[in-house]
Amino acid sequence: MTSSDVISPSELQKQRITELAIPLLSFGSPLAGVLSWKLGFEIDFQYFAIGCLIASCLLAYLAWIRPKKDIVALSTPIYAIIFFVVPTDFTAGLTLQLLYAVSITLLLIRLKYRFGTSHTAVSLGKELAAPLKIYTGQTCDALSGIVPDAAHQAAIVISQFAQGEYRHVALVAGAASDQPAGVPALVRAFAIVHEHALILEQSLPRPDPFQVFLPEDEDLLANPAHPEYSEDRKFDAQLDNALLLLFSAAWHGAESDRPYLLSCQDFLLKLFA
């Protein structure tokens, strides 16, 4: 896992402080202007727009550090300059600044819940949930020969797939499927995830035929496909098994990546259903 793929707890805390500063600055600055006028200091209300401008720059920064860029949030400093460069009287200035504060606060909420955090947050102090702990224990011996580079690539694939970064997943998994992994089933797992990531990224229909595990891989699979499954369910089962197998491989072969793998538990537990 590279430093560009994850975010440490301290960095996550800094981002939360930055997020909190945006509404505080954007609303606090015009309210400070109101207080100043009430105290008899009739300063040009245009100058109190500095809080909105700084908040816009902070919002643009938060948008910039995310894998998926929000163009609207990135452009807010430009709009702040356009809106507040012209001097205004008290009423017009206060109204415009408060409306702007509401707008960038809504953009912050949109950025946070639609575009996620900047990469993967490290989750410390946790243990594997029971289903994952059992599965990784069952596959430990079979994965003892994994190549360390393949294990690290598996950790990246899991982390990025959990975030919906399918283009990055396709690149990493595609490259890994062309390299020896030490365990043949892992090569097939990378190939399966590569195929699914491309389909999800490009909204393509299910291919026929599609990548599958071989019969000799069945002992490594968490949820082997049943004969009565439909073709669509069999297709989905290949992905579920591939992701869980790559998780186990990363867990055993790349211990330094375990904190990042732990942060993906909620996503992986759904694959057992």
Image: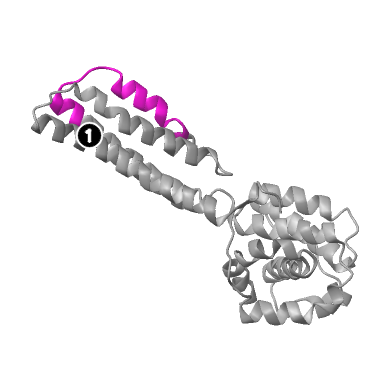
Quarter of the image with the C terminus in it: bottom right
The reply to whether residue 59 is visible in this rendering is yes
61 to the left or right of 124: left
Question: Mark 1 — residue?
Answer: 30
Tell me where the magenta segment starts and ends, as one range: 72-94
Q: Is residue 69 left or right of residue 72?
A: right
Q: Residues within 10 Å of mark 1 (few under 14, many from 20)?
A: many
Q: Quadrant of the N terminus?
A: bottom right
| Along the line of sight, the residue nearer the viewer: 73 or 50 | 50
- At horizontal 77% and vertical 82% (from top left) the residue drawn is 138
Dominant secondary structure of the residues highlighted in magenta in the image: helix
Q: Residue furthest top?
A: 86
In this view, 55 is above or below 211 = above
Q: Amino acid at mark 1?
A: Pro
Q: Quadrant of residue 57?
A: top left
Asked if 95 appears above or below 16 in the picture, the reply is above
**Looking at the image, which is closer to me, 258 or 159?**
258
Is 135 placed above or below 252 here? below
State the scheme by which the image is colored. one colour
Q: Quick one: SS at disc 1?
A: helix
